[in-house]
Image (cartoon, rainbow, N blue to C red):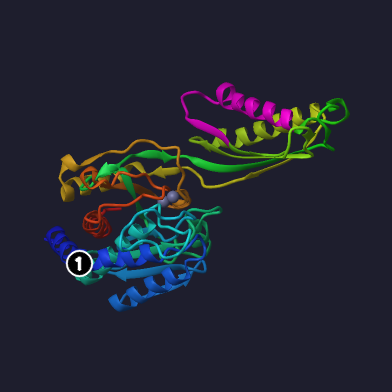
Amino acid sequence: MLQQKIKTLARQYADEFIEVRRHLHVNPELSYQEFETSKFVQTKLAAFGIPFEVMATTGVLGMIKGKNPDSRVIALRADMDALPIQEENEVDYKSKNNGVMHACGHDVHTTILLGAAKILNELKGEWEGTIKLLFQPGEERNPGGASFMIRDGALENPRPQGIFGLHVHPGLDLGKLSFRKGRVMASADEIFITIRSKGGHAAAPHLTADTVLIASHLIVSLQQIISRNNNPTSPSVLSICSIQGGHTTNVIPTEVKLMGTFRAMDETWRLKAHELIRKQAVGLVESMGAEIDLHIDVGYPTVDNDPSLTERAWQLANEYMGKENVSETEMRMGAEDFGYYTQVIPGCFYRLGVRNKEKGIIHNVHTPKFNIDENAIETGIGMMAWLGSSAVV
Ligand SMILES: [Zn+2]
Ligand SMILES: [Zn+2]
């Protein structure tokens, strides 16, 4: 049967795709600069005999037609970009691009989609419909590569009835998968504030407006928006993560800059909060005698897993992995540009376990020591091929 054939091929190709992952890991590229990665993906697809087109500059859209290509259309998605982090793993496939590292596992995601594509193409006489392969740029940086893939038509002609994406999860053991229905990840917006006055002598604060003191009040008062205006049953986070201003003990600086991030699980609250942040910041800063520039860079929307698509995927995962290896994933305040796809078509974003405590593979994503147990690649490839070939939409 199909599931067994997929499992056999996933095992057979495991070493080949571990090599693919290592190649990508050695050669990471930052968001929207994935030129070599894109070429590599194109070369692989060409070698597998899968037609593709390039979009969103470095994005690649592949297409595999099975039996009755119009009967169902499924999209499978991987992100390709790396992070500005210096790798600290001493492995022979360590990043050779100084200060750039696949610290979010997007090398693994790209590898898994390539592996699934190879298997699905080989078995295309045994499944129904069309599968679109989305290799997207720029997941780690606003406005998000997913938005460019959509803009360039990745979800049209034909329009998929469902899209699947995965993320490696260092909080989950090798050999496990996790799913969650409904809203699974938060929206994320970036906040940039500059507080200005003419500055002056620290001994004469009455002749200026104290930008440092105002910034301090503002940071504290913004927290009140979360604690007093947000419905406490819906998670929301505001973190001011940078404060820059001043150089010495006795000069009130002309400028203090703040930067932070705002996360929410409710789109109505999200927009209301932007207004409250703006009103509060402008009112407070101006009432204390300074000027303000405030910019909210609107980022990714929430990731919403379609309940029925996710239910079916969960069921397929139970069959493929064994029920005991599939669990419910936790809600997270992290953000993912996969949310853009789920605004357009039903989507399911699931997690693949990559942790192995015995091997010391325990470090979180976005850290210099992040790594995966590469045995997860076989599972990832097989499961994605299984979902692509068998998920009913
Ligand atoms: Zn990331
Ligand atoms: Zn990521």
Q: Is residue 217 magenta?
A: yes
106 relative to 205 in the view: left or right: left
Callout 1 crowding tier (Cα within 10 Å): few <14, some 14–19, many ≥20:
some
Decide: is 337 above or below 278: below
**Which quadrant of the figure has residue 111?**
bottom left
Side (left or right) of 366 relative to 358:
right
Residue at the extreme right: 207
Provide the residue span drawn in magenta.
212-240
Query: In which quadrant of the rendered view does residue 224 lie?
Result: top right
Residue at horizontal 52 percent and vertical 37 percent from the top: 263
Q: Is residue 299 visible?
A: yes
The residue that label 1 is drawn on is 13
Quadrant for the N terminus, please. bottom left
Instruction: Give the SS element for disc 1.
Output: helix
For image coordinates 58% across by 21% down, the residue present is 228
What amino acid is at disc 1?
Answer: Tyr
Residue drawn where x is 46% and y is 59% of the image? 100
